[in-house]
Image: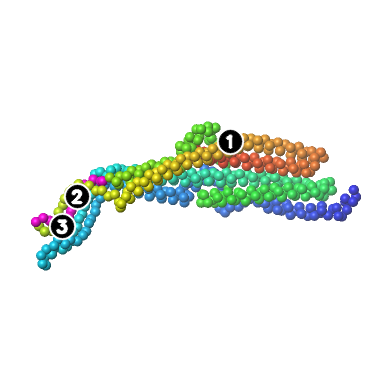
């Protein structure tokens, strides 16, 4: 026994005692809160509203909507008369030096009487494009809201992980102080102090990893909302608003999906475009009012005249290009229809995935909370038994570590469930 107390045996103990302040300083430095310049606290509803109103992608869709509105106005004007002016030169002939040369001018006003449905189909196509552009705005807003929900849930998860890990760093620091005193009094071995330092560093690493992941999530939120985000705080409705009615929720999701609405309007637009291209093959009947100047008049040489007439106009394009245009429009209509069918499957698949994740996380959350409570009870029991000499220091350190791991697992499952619930509410339109 005396050989264990020699200088060589006490050297590792002294090294451990000297290293302890360094580990403690490192631990304390990791406890400093993360800073963000001019960043404030945000709730999820505030983040959602900010992202969907200020993001450049929304502004771009609004510009597309303005263009579609202008296109609709232009289609409506096709019902009104079309003015035109035609200028030319004439050579009416003559004898000797009396050749009648000069210019001609025709001012016309054409009012469509019948166009084979081309104008009505064009207006319908413009209406559907306008509706599709409106749905596209909602679609990009939903996409942004989904990204915000995921990033905000991840930020809250990492905030909670950091809090849990910091609490265990403080607890392990106290335990390290206790074992340091026992080692100094030669009641415990220096290996116990080394073990405490190792577990403290592991918890410090958990804090560091959580802060890094938190910074990543906050940066993503800042890019989505365009403002610094220091912390995401929970609101009462973050985990509420869902009922266990899967068929009803899926039906509502498919009904309100802006992506499906947009594709439905685009399919109708393609159908109207087919009618427009087909109407080109039919002649148009116009009422024409025109004023002609510089034309040859019977018995009077040249002069000016006004006349009204009904014109039958038929323009099919070069060669068979009109038929090819109809075929193109029909193929585009079929492509749009298939795209909508594929989108229905994708929306359904996303819903099924989110629903399964939500249900699974709810079940695992109950188990995780039970494990957390059991681990805390075991750690308390091992702490008392260690003081009584019935458990080793390693047993107590392991129990403390298991408590931390159980708390972190509970945090992960809780925010996994919250993220899935938020996505389901956004997809079904129950979270505004």
Most distant residue in the right direction: 2
Q: Nearer the viewer, mark 2 or mark 3?
A: 3
Of marks 1 and 2, which one's residue comes earlier in the chain?
A: 2
Near-viewer residue (180 or 291): 291
Residue at the extreme left of the image, as rendered = 299
Mark 2, Cα crowd under 10 Å, few <14 / some 14-19 / many 20+, is some
Give the CA distance from mark 2 to mark 3: 16 Å
Q: Residue at 35% across / 44% down in the picture?
A: 274
Mark 3, secondary structure of its residue = strand
Colour style of the rendered protein structure: rainbow
- Residue at mark 2: 289
Farthest-out residue, bottom: 97
Which residues make up the magenta segment?
A: 283-299
Query: Is residue 230 in view?
Result: no
- Residue 404 picture location, percent across and down: 69, 43
For the stretch drawn in magenta, the main secondary structure is strand
Q: Which mark is residue 295?
A: 3
* Element marked by disc 2: strand
From the image, tell me which residue sits under label 1.
Answer: 359
Inspect the magenta stretch and tell me whether residue 311 lies in it: no
Circle nearer the N terminus (2, 3) = 2
Q: Measure the alpha-carbon separation of dots 1 and 2.
A: 73 Å
């Amino acid at each position: 026994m005396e050989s264990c107390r020699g200088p060589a045996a006490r050297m590792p103990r002294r090294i451990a005692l000297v290293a302890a302040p360094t580990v403690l300083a490192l631990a304390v430095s990791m406890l400093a809160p993360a800073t963000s310049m001019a960043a404030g606290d945000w709730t999820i509803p505030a983040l959602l509203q900010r992202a969907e109103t200020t993001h450049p992608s929304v502004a771009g869709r609004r510009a597309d909507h303005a263009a579609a509105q202008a296109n609709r106005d232009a289609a409506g004007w096709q019902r009104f008369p079309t003015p035109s002016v035609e200028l030319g030169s004439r050579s009416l002939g003559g004898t000797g030096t009396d050749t009648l040369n000069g210019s001609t001018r025709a001012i016309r006003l054409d009012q469509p009487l019948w166009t084979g449905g081309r104008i009505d189909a064009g207006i319908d196509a413009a209406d559907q494009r306008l509706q599709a552009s409106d749905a596209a705005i909602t679609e990009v807003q939903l996409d942004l809201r989904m990204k915000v929900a995921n990033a905000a849930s991840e930020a809250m998860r990492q905030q909670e992980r950091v809090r849990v890990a910091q609490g265990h760093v403080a607890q392990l620091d106290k335990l390290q102080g206790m074992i340091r005193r026992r080692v100094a009094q030669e009641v415990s071995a220096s290996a116990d102090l080394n073990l405490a330092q190792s577990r403290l560093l592991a918890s410090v690493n958990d804090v560091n990893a959580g802060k890094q992941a938190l910074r990543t999530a906050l940066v993503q939120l800042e890019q989505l909302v365009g403002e610094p985000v220091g912390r995401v705080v929970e609101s009462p409705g973050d985990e509420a608003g869902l009922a266990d009615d899967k068929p009803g929720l899926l039906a509502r999701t498919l009904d309100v999906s802006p992506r499906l609405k947009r594709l439905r309007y685009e399919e109708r637009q393609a159908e109207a475009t087919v009618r427009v291209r087909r109407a080109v093959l039919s002649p148009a009947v116009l009422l024409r009012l025109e004023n002609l100047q510089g034309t040859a008049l019977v018995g009077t040489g040249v002069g000016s005249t006004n006349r009204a007439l009904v014109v039958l106009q038929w323009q099919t394009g070069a060669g068979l290009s009109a038929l090819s245009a109809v075929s193109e429009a029909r193929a585009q209509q079929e492509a749009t229809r298939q795209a909508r069918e594929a989108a229905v499957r994708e929306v359904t698949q996303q819903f099924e995935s989110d629903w399964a994740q939500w249900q699974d996380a709810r079940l695992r959350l109950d188990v995780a909370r039970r494990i957390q409570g059991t681990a805390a009870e075991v750690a308390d029991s091992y702490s008392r038994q260690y003081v009584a000499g019935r458990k080793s220091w390693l047993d107590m350190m392991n129990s403390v570590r298991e408590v931390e791991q159980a708390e972190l697992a509970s945090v992960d499952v809780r925010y996994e469930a919250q993220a899935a619930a938020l996505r389901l509410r956004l997809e079904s339109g129950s979270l505004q």
